[in-house]
Image: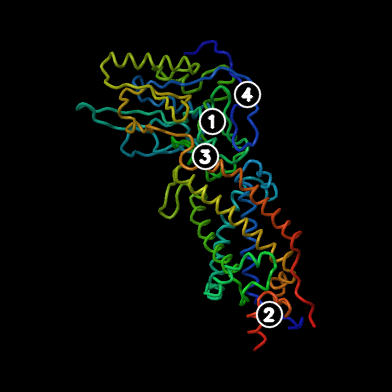
Amino acid sequence: MMRDAPSSSLSIRRVSGSPDPAPGIRQGPEYAKLVDISRCIGCKGCEVACKEWNELGIEPTENFGSFQSHRDLSPDTWLLMRFSEAEIDGDFHWLIKKDACLHCEEPGCLYACPAPGAIVQYDNGIVDIDQDRCIGCQMCVSGCPFDVPRFSAETRKVYKCNMCVDRVESGLEPACVKTCPTNAIAWGTKDEMVSLGERKVERLRERGFARPALYDPSGVGGTHMMYVVPHGDRLEEYDLPEEPTASPGALSALYGLRKLGAPALGLGLVAAGLHYLGFGPQEPEEES
Amino acid sequence: MSRGGVQRFTFVERVVHWWVGLSFVFLLLTGLALSHPRLFWITTLFGGGSTTRRLHPWVGILFAGSIVAMVALWAREMRVGPSDRAWLRAIRHYAVHDKENVPPAGKYNAGQKLFFWAMSVLGVLYLVTGIPLWLPGGVLGLGPFYGSTVNVMRLGHYLATVGGGLLLIVHVYLGTLAYPGTLGAMLHGSVTRAWAKLHHPLWHEEESGR
């Protein structure tokens, strides 16, 4: 899918922990990855490319009865091919998921983050952590509906896939896209990838898949990594949440109420001051 | 007493009071700093965002310990009785310094007792709601805590903070500006007889009778 894409701008569209609007005013193209799971052969070349480009540390692993390279994502592993085993119509199937940041349009991590500027969303759709501003509170870890960000106990910062933002800025595709030998990962503008995904779903249906689906969950406003899922009725088995949301539970209530807390305390101080002006101190009578 | 006053708080009581108070003020300020972007600048006073985030839970443990010490020290004296109910019914008179219409208080009036119990309950709330925020990955077999849980805890922790902050304002105001002579009880431990007679007449009688 590589072509002379206009290099995208890193104008900031959303920013964490800021009382002010994000400064971005440009409207560049929005980019997206499209992972066609039906074309993935499980080679893990993307994992290696990710480590190489981002210069992430090598982590020893062990045989734990799976084709998967490592058990989990980590501060040094931003991309992990997850291999779920399933029996479908009497046949063995691998339900492979490219587990990495989905770069949500409505990013739960960014919404949950209290540190100004620690998480930003560029106008090209990429959600990025600025570790220099990260305070290590891990609110993003629990705020992410996909369980992607990973906390490093060593640096006390959180890490995740940044969609090779340095490559994208220069008009290149992310390293995983570049390396994929079967073109299972496509790269282009979000609109292009949505229509490509829809065509791929249609083709899978023609090939006899009963419920293929394009995974672009609306609960997070859509994502900038989407999946073509051959067995769309088995999302949970792919480890893809059915209805992810950007601000689960009480977050929006908190964000509404927290505007009132400091003013309430300020009013408390004013009330104490008024009481003093109105009623004054109550002095004990002088000792006789 | 050398000052000719009445001993109100022992050395141990004063130490525990400031242990509770200073750790609470630290937690209130650092907590507010992390609660809203407009207050994030407060983290600068405590060494920056990362340091603030690291210190807050550990001071929280110190604070929890201080609440335990506080309850151990004062729970008996703070039991609420029938006379306290009468005092509470007259609280609007108390609020405007109309002492004639307020039933005489013992060593602690009902307001002080309720403040004590409110802080004790808040102490438990801070701990329960704070642990998932401190260690969202889980601790002692609990967790990991997911977004839905963490956000409820954040909301609870925040509301408890605002509640505790308002109580602190009342407490400090009454203990300093409103009732001169009170602060000394928590500094050198004693108050004047006149102070005791004015604010805690029954306690004053007890002390004088000895």
The residue carrying pointer 4 sits among few (fewer than 14), some (14 to 19) or many (20 or more) residues within 10 Å by Cα, namely some
Judge by depth and name the residue closer to the eye, B189 or A271: A271
* Residue under pointer 4: A11
Sooner in the amino-acid sequence: mark 3 or mark 1: 1
Instruction: In the rendered structure, find residue A153 and report the number of the disc placed on it.
Output: none
Establish if B86 lies above or below A145: below
Residue B10, how many percent across, how many down?
65, 77
Comparing labels 2 and 1, the label whose residue is closer to the camera: 2
Residue at point 37%, 25% (across, down): A43
Residue at point 47%, 37% (across, down): A144
* Residue under pointer 2: B7
The answer to whether residue A233 is left or right of residue A46 is left
Residue A173, how many percent across, how many down?
51, 19
Q: CA distance from mark 4 to mark 1?
A: 25 Å
Comparing labels 3 and 1, the label whose residue is closer to the camera: 3
Residue B152, how many percent across, how many down?
48, 47
* Residue under pointer 1: A55
